[in-house]
Image (tube, rainbow, N blue to C red):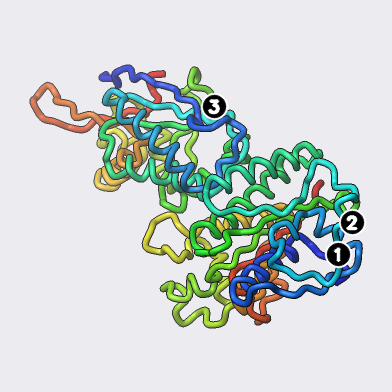
Amino acid sequence: MGFVTPGGFVGLACILEEWTSKYGVVPVVLPNEDVTAYMHRMDFFDYFKDRLRLDRDISHLQFRGRHRASLSELRTVRDDDDVTEVTKQFCGTLSDRGVPKEKVRRCFAVISETLDHAVDHARSACGAYTAIQPWPSLNKVAVAVSDAGVGIPRTISAHPDARGVAFEDHELITLAANHLVSSRHDEEGRGGGLTSALQNVRSGSGSMVIWSGRGWVEFAGMGIITASELAPTFAGTCAEAVFPIS
Amino acid sequence: MPTASRATMKVVEFPQTREADTPLGNRQLGEEERTLLEQEVAKAEPGGIVGIDARRVEFLNYTFADECFGKLFSRMHAGEFGERFAVLVANKSRLEEELKDVSVALAARKLAVLCVDDPLHAQDWRVIGELPKSLEDTLNVVEAGDTNEALAGRLGINLTTCNNRTDRLVKLRLLRRTLHQGELGYKQYEFAPVLASF
């Protein structure tokens, strides 16, 4: 592994949550020094401690410099109060870093809606992992949320709108992105969160990847789906959105 | 000509449970805020208006908007708060940016809400949410004391159609309706804009 995005390590965190709960201590072959240091800066290893058996000692990394404003540390969210606290912190940090308000609002919409989905629908034992990462040199910001719950396809496979229309996991994810398709379809007003997140991505000229179950869907531009296919199974949902900052 | 009695507007700060810069992004928070707003509406005098001053909101998402405003106005639409009204206080720019998901959430429930920039200048109102063009056209021409007959004549539509439109506007809490007894003893509904007397 030569590079890891926020989506990559929140997803990895959930995979490790699943594996450590099933198999106990998991052996890990660490990536190169830079990526390992980056993950260390993101507090990735703090969440697992002795649940991972690393192939080398990383104690020296604690003496390396951290990103200013502790911007992109990995965070966990378990309930609505956590959603409020984490989104407030992320919004504050992005604003402090000079990200325009409009872009911060889009990041907020994506993070809060996907976190709310994780807390409200996913039934994820480890809650949700989330992280943000601005790349000023690339003029981009990435936001990511992942959970180890039941996954989008399973939560909506019984939805009336899915019958005869969406069979495979990637088709069900695409359907979930449509307005008012929710696992709680008997409750009025439900199902707009993911759609709203996606609209924010699209109107902000961003892109978004959702990986859940065996479905992998990439959304970009004004409603364009650039990839929709079956992928290796992800037990839960991992979503990453990338926006231009200016 | 009969006119609507002078209504009162009580303006409440929003959000009430958190600092204004708190991102409003989940159902729990939406429910807490809605509960307080419902108490304010229930406390208002019949015919009174609660102005929800959302001018300080920085971040608000669809889920919160649905839980707070979608459900509040859904209950008002169902008649749970009787002859009381609620309007949103926020300017056009804020409604299109920070509060844009309020309109989306209301539209998803086929609801609409009156908004004013400033409670002191409530005659400059607009509607957000989903309001069919025919209802919007009707709402725009209503004058205090209008009857269905007068409105139908002004709009050039038949009485039944007009009656249906005003009925829907009243249920949406976008229009006042009072039962007026005429000089000859007959009764008929008279209408007035919610914010006409400001």
Q: Which residue is mark 2?
A: A60
Q: Secondary structure at mark 1?
A: loop
Q: Are marks 3 and 1 on the same chain?
A: no
- Write down the chain letter for disc 2: A
B187 relative to A91, above or below:
above
The residue lying toward the viewer, choosing from A60 and A137, is A60
Marks 1 and 2, how far apart at CA: 8 Å
**Quadrant including the N terminus of chain A:** bottom right
Horizontal relation, residue A88 to residue B3: left or right: right
**The disc labelled 2 sits on which kind of residue?**
His
Q: Secondary structure at mark 3?
A: loop
Question: Which of the two marks, 3 or 1, is nearer to us in this view?
Answer: 1
Q: Which mark is residue A57?
A: 1
**The disc labelled 1 sits on which kind of residue?**
Asp
**Residue at 36% in and 45% down:** B74
**The disc labelled 3 sits on which kind of residue?**
Asp
Marks 2 and 3, how far apart at CA: 58 Å
Determine contact: label 1, label 2, CB under 8 Å.
yes
**Residue at 47% in and 32% down:** B88
